[in-house]
Image: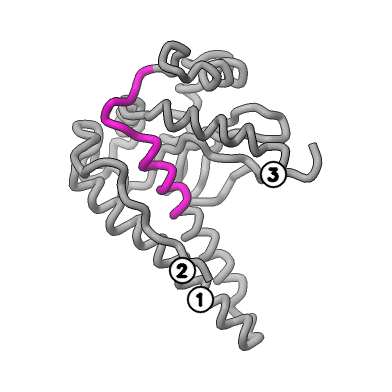
Amino acid sequence: MATYTLPELPYDYAALEPVINPQIIELHHDKHHAAYVKGANDTLEQLGEARDKEAWGAINGLQKNLAFHLSGHILHSIYWHNMTGDGGGEPLAADGVGDLADAIAESFGSYAGFKSQLTKAAATTQGSGWGVLAYEPVSGRLIVEQVYDHQGNVGQGSVPILVFDAWEHAFYLQYKNQKVDFIEAMWRVVNWQDVARRYAAAKERADVLLLAP
């Protein structure tokens, strides 16, 4: 049976300085993300044992653990590629991401409105969580989601295309308790080329993701 593996970073630890320092990237990827991968694989093994033994007493806890660890793995895998040391600014047609820029303007009224909403969603998540820009296939529009932990408050079927990690392990060593400062700085490293590719892929798959419009 297939298991999950920790993906390699698409850059070195220092590639996102000064927005994120190398120590944070190393710990975040090599320790925290790795722990989610291990947790997902361990939970799948425990679920397999429960099936073999017809021992379902722990099923609720195991399903919750799988959702937590697997979603953590998926969101972090997107997160690394959503960033680049050459990123930032506003998505523009001149940079080859015009479809994404148009979708943002249509869904949120303006880029400025979208940026403010995602910033607030990420920065005001209670406890640990994420701010997420997602493609919602029923309406065919972009939405902002405020994700608690790794999997709460998500519209079913929505596809994350840009994620801001607002867990303390993503910023505390550098920004201390100033989560808002970290989220504001994140806009300087957004990889709009990656976000645009994810948006295009989500649109292409929309009609096969759901059984009914």
Q: Is residue 83 magenta?
A: yes
Q: Which residue is mark 2?
A: 41
Whole-percent x and y of residue 76? 41, 48
Q: Secondary structure at mark 2?
A: helix
Residues packed near mark 2 inside 10 Å, few (<14), some (14 to 19) or many (20 plus)? some
Residue 109 quadrant: top right
- What is the span of residues highlighted in magenta in the rendered image? 73-89
Whole-percent x and y of residue 96? 45, 18
Residue under the point 49% across and 31% down: 197
Real-space Cα distance between discs 2 and 3? 25 Å
Front tag of 1 and 3: 3
Q: Are marks 2 and 1 in contact (CB under 8 Å)?
A: yes
Q: Which residue is mark 3?
A: 209
In the picture, measured across the screen, residue 136 lies left or right of residue 180, that is right
Whole-percent x and y of residue 213? 79, 36
Q: Is residue 76 magenta?
A: yes
Q: Earlier in the sequence, mark 2 or mark 3?
A: 2
Considering depth in this image, is 94 or 116 the residue closer to the camera? 94
Q: Which residue is mark 1?
A: 45
In the picture, measured across the screen, residue 182 lies left or right of residue 50, that is left
Residues packed near mark 3 inside 10 Å, few (<14), some (14 to 19) or many (20 plus)? some
